[in-house]
Amino acid sequence: MFLWAQSCKETPVKSPSQPQVNESPTPTDETTKQKPSILNTSTSQEFTEWNHYPILDTAIKNLETGDPSFFKQPIEDISQLFLDIKKSVPKSLKTNGILARVKVTETLARKLHELYSVEDTDLIESEKTKADLIESHSNLKFQINKTREKEAQRIIKPI
């Protein structure tokens, strides 16, 4: 009986056939809230052919610093800018990915304009739209950079 009681107190030995699981530490709130960093360095080569894009780029940069004056202009001015941007997209950048991101940026710019033009604006909604617009512009710049990078990697086969 004494031997049986002693054997019950011992911890069972893991067999070598069972895989050992290494538990990774659980992520904290800080690591889950971090956004992946996206390289958004745009070269001037992109804009030599695309004359109207720098206007939008400047307006978004001003919005980031707290100057929303461009988005408080009449909607016709904003519409005309995006029309000019879409018409003057360089051939090398006329891809579905870039055109879709331009459209998303246009939609958010129109929404932000509407929120700024209403007297009783929901501050939370306008801040979210502002953040979404900045993010969509960042995605547009990222897509432009990736398209340029892919174009630069294209290898021409000799005949």
Image (tube, grey):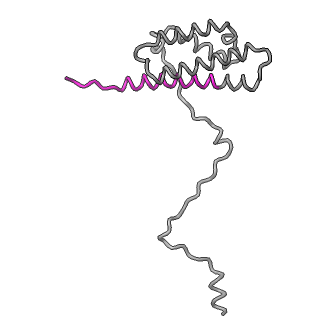
Q: Which image quadrant is residue 90 in?
A: top left
Instruction: Give coordinates of residue 41: x percent, y percent.
Output: 52, 22
Please identify the residue farthest to the bottom as the structure is shown.
1
Instruction: Give coordinates of residue 144: x percent, y percent.
Output: 48, 22
Give the dominant element type of the magenta stretch: helix, strand or loop.
helix
Residues in magenta, as a range: 132-159
Residue name at image x 56 percent, y 76 percent: 13
Q: Is 109 one of the magenta-colored residues?
A: no
Please identify the residue farthest to the left as the structure is shown.
159
In this image, 126 relative to 98: left or right?
right
The vertical placement of 30 against 62, above or below, is below
The vertical placement of 65 against 28, above or below, is above
Q: Is 147 one of the magenta-colored residues?
A: yes
Q: Which image quadrant is residue 66 in?
A: top right
Task: Give the quadrant of the N terminus.
Answer: bottom right
Residue name at image x 45 percent, y 23 percent: 96
Residue name at image x 66 percent, y 20 percent: 64
Please identify the residue farthest to the right as the structure is shown.
120
Instruction: Give coordinates of residue 89: x percent, y percent.
Output: 46, 13
